Amino acid sequence: MRRLLLFSNSSDHGRGYLDHGIDAIRELLGGRSRILFVPFALADREAYAERFRGRLGEAGFEVEALTADGRGRRQVENADAVFVGGGNTFRLLKTLQDAQLLAPLGARARAGLPYLGASAGINLACPTVRTTNDMPIVEPHGFDALGLVPFQINPHYLDPDPGSIHMGETRELRIVEFLEENDCAVVGLREGAWIRVEGERAALGGRTGVRIFRRGMEPEERPPGASLDDLMGG
């Protein structure tokens, strides 16, 4: 049974790193105290892992950083839980592909390994990474991701600012363009929000809502606490 906790962001305005989500992390993990952290979305993996280790260590968790060498597969196989950090989605995906860790990670998550992530880490949980906000600073071997949920997520979703003089594309327009070529629901996950998945059930947590986009339909708003079960059917 899939057990996922998907954060739009790891740092919420006015609060420290992961402060807004630490209670949700404890609730999902229950008695588990060891987390395998995936730092591949940033260039300085060691510093990133130390930051995560410091914050989760304060909360009583033991953190091990995933490596991209020959030890990585065994680390995934032995993990009690995994947290995939944010950063550049394309770098994250390519590193996992090159290290041949994408398939083992997906298999364990589909078998019940608690999967937690933020930003790029939740793009990775989708069928593809095509709804990321990131620049393709590296070229992965295709865009297919883990497919732990049957819908796409756009993290850090921003609503159009009616007072802005910016004349470029809005986030909503970019998602509409995605739907012109891809028939898949897209969840615009605002800052401060997260999605918790238990098996075939999904619900929205946090302080903000989501905007859901589907091809040929008007966007739909859902508030914190709302069910997303209908999106789990594909």
Image (cartoon, helix red, strand yellow):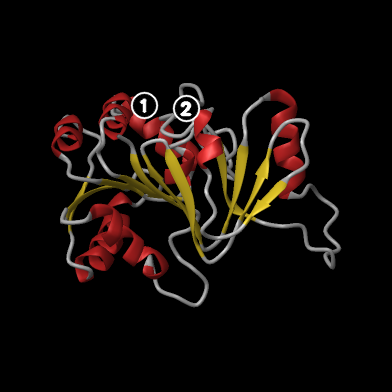
Q: Which residue lies furthest to the bottom in this view?
A: 14
Q: Which residue is drawn at 60% across and 44% down?
A: 187
- Indicate which disc residue 189 carries: none
Residue 29 locus on image (x, y percent): 24, 53
Whichever of labels 1 and 2 marks the residue nearer the N terminus, that label is 1
Residue 208 in the figure: left or right of residue 59: right
- Give the residue pinned by disc 1: 97
Circle 1 crowding by C-alpha within 10 Å: few under 14, some 14–19, many from 20: some
Q: Which residue is drawn at 41% across and 30% down?
A: 146
Residue 187 in the figure: left or right of residue 71: right
Tag 1's secondary structure?
helix
Residue 78 locus on image (x, y percent): 13, 37
Q: Residue at x 47, y 27 (%)?
A: 140
Examine the rendered structure and indicate whether residue 38 appears above or below residue 97.
below
Tag 2's secondary structure?
loop
> What kind of residue is marked 2?
Pro
- Give the residue pinned by disc 2: 140
Residue 186 in the figure: left or right of residue 16: right
Determine which quarter of the picture holds residue 93: top left
Determine which quarter of the picture holds residue 1: top left
> What kind of residue is marked 1?
Gln
Examine the rendered structure and indicate whether residue 154 appears above or below residue 180.
below
The quadrant the C terminus occupies is top right
Examine the rendered structure and indicate whether residue 93 appears above or below residue 34.
above
Image mark count: 2
Label 1, label 2: how many angstroms apart (C-alpha)?
8 Å
* Residues marked 1 and 2 touching at CB (< 8 Å): yes
Residue 171 locus on image (x, y percent): 71, 48
Circle 2 crowding by C-alpha within 10 Å: few under 14, some 14–19, many from 20: some
Examine the rendered structure and indicate whether residue 59 appears above or below residue 232.
below
Q: Which residue is drawn at 26% across and 36% down?
A: 112
